[in-house]
């Protein structure tokens, strides 16, 4: 077996091609830290590199914003939390024993593929974070030295991805490393772009339109912070102090210096006493308190306008970030449904990447004929009573048609969902349990005859 794989990799003379094992190599990509450290003096001189619809530096900018801006950070976290809600693994195997072996292999794979973040569950979280920030996800699956299984999964930074054209004008996936482009093995590299524009292979970041509102938000918050530090939260206390008496024959310059020193002492005394909530003075000082509530309301209105633009750029309703601009409970349910539908778009990319890793791992373990499909668990409805009531009305409608002999019993079964299969025909289904981080077999869908 090892000799066959070596022949495929060019380590021996192959008499005839062997198609049972994938042509995998050692690691070619670089992770974020390695890639960033290699950018000193980087220069691309390959004219075949395809240009993106926006500067590549945009990916790095959004990475930084997702760490610094509280609302973009919340957007990424919400995407991860609502995206990774559990998944099932459908194994298309010829027998129960083969399916059991595949589940054992999948569990070993899930435990070791991403060791620094909890294995496969942590990898899925990282993929949702990557797709939320960049609009795509990319993983290189690296085999062990004996080419017997997938040992590790390495996230390839989307900001380092480049697409080139070969002599046949076919797309080639590459990574920018220092001053050169390194081709990534398509057999072991999973790339998926959730959002593209006009046929460009580069993913479009979903939060691309949020860069400018984030800058406005940061500028306004800086001004508000400075304003509050100077004026305090409650208002401004004005103290009108009588001038100190002038000494006989005292020059103006000397008198002004004495008066300024007197004001400074009075101000310092008031500052210390105001910390205790009380201020005492003689009758030569007149106090006047100016409230700044009206000014604060104006600042809030301006901030709300900026935040509404930011939330729109993130394709999220303000209520998803804890702001309620006159939204009703009914509208909040609509927002939740829209949010879960948007998450499904991101789940598709993560699904393809994880399926690629499982298939490659099965092939290296000698199970290249075993099929695999990943299906994420359906998000729970925010209004279960409404859904149950709608289901009841639909079932009563079908039963009424059956009673009137408009449809047959078999047609009624199909309409009620009793003849639908949630998995591919002939598939063994295993559920990934987050607590144990293992796949557990729980059902089998028989093959149609």
Image: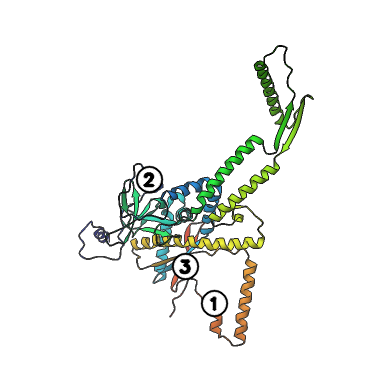
Which labelled disc corresponds to residue 429? 3
Q: Which residue is mark 2?
A: 34
* Drawn side of residue 426 relative to residue 179, left or right: right
Quarter that holds the N terminus: bottom left
Callout 3 secondary element: strand
In this rendering, which labeled residue sits more in front, label 2 or label 3? 2
Residue found farthest to the bottom: 405
Instruction: Identify the residue at image location x=59%, y=55%.
Output: 320
- Mark 1 neighbour class, 10 Å CA radius: few under 14, some 14 to 19, many 20 or more: few
| Whole-percent x, y for residue 97 in the image | 40, 68
Q: Which residue is mark 1?
A: 418
Q: Quadrant of the rendered structure where residue 119 is? A: bottom left
Residue found farthest to the right: 283
CA–CA distance in space, label 2 to label 1: 53 Å
Which badge, 2 or 1, is on the more N-terminal residue?
2
Q: Are marks 1 and 3 in contact (CB under 8 Å)?
A: no
Q: Nearer the viewer, residue 210 or 91?
A: 210
CA–CA distance in space, label 1 to label 3: 18 Å
CA–CA distance in space, label 2 to label 3: 39 Å
Which badge, 1 or 3, is on the more N-terminal residue?
1
Q: Nearer the viewer, residue 50 or 124?
A: 50
């Amino acid at each position: 077996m090892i000799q066959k794989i070596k022949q495929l990799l060019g380590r021996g003379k192959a008499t005839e091609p062997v198609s049972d094992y994938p042509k995998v190599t050692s690691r070619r990509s670089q992770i974020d830290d390695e890639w960033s450290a290699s950018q000193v003096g980087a220069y691309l001189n390959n004219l075949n590199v395809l240009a993106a619809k926006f500067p590549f530096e945009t990916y790095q900018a959004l990475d930084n914003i997702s760490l610094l801006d509280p609302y973009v950070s919340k957007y990424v976290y919400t995407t991860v939390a609502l995206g990774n809600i559990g998944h099932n693994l459908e194994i298309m195997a010829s027998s129960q024993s083969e399916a059991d072996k595949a589940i054992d292999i999948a569990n070993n794979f899930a435990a070791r593929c991403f060791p620094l973040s909890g294995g496969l569950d942590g990898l899925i979280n990282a993929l949702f974070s990557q797709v939320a920030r960049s609009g795509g996800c990319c993983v290189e699956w690296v085999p062990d030295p004996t080419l017997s299984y997938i040992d590790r999964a390495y996230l390839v930074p989307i900001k380092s991805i480049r697409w080139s054209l070969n002599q046949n004008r076919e797309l080639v996936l590459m990574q920018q490393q220092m001053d050169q482009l390194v081709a990534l093995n398509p057999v072991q590299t999973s790339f998926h772009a959730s959002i593209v524009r006009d046929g460009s292979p580069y993913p479009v970041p979903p939060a691309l339109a949020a860069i400018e509102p984030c800058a406005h938000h940061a500028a306004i918050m800086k001004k508000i912070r400075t304003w509050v530090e100077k004026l305090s939260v409650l208002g401004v206390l004005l103290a009108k102090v009588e001038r100190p008496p002038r000494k006989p024959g005292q020059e103006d310059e000397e008198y002004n210096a004495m008066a300024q020193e007197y004001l400074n002492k009075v101000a310092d005394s008031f500052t210390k006493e105001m910390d205790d909530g009380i201020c005492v003075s003689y009758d030569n000082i007149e106090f006047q308190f100016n409230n700044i509530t009206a000014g604060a309301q104006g600042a809030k209105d301006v901030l709300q306008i900026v935040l509404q633009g930011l939330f729109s750029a993130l394709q999220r309703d303000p209520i998803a970030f804890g702001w309620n601009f006159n939204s009703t409970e009914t509208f909040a349910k609509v927002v939740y449904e829209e949010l879960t539908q948007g998450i499904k778009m991101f789940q598709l990319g993560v699904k393809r990447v994880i399926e690629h890793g499982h298939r490659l791992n099965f092939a290296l373990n000698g199970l290249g004929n075993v099929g695999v499909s990943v299906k994420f668990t359906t998000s729970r409805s925010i209004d279960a009573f409404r859904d149950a009531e709608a289901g009841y009305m639909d079932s009563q409608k079908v039963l009424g048609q059956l009673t009137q002999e408009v449809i047959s019993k078999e047609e009624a079964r199909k309409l009620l969902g009793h003849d639908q299969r949630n998995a591919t025909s002939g598939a063994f289904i295993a559920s990934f349990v987050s607590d144990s981080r293992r796949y557990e077999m729980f059902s089998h869908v028989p093959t149609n005859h």
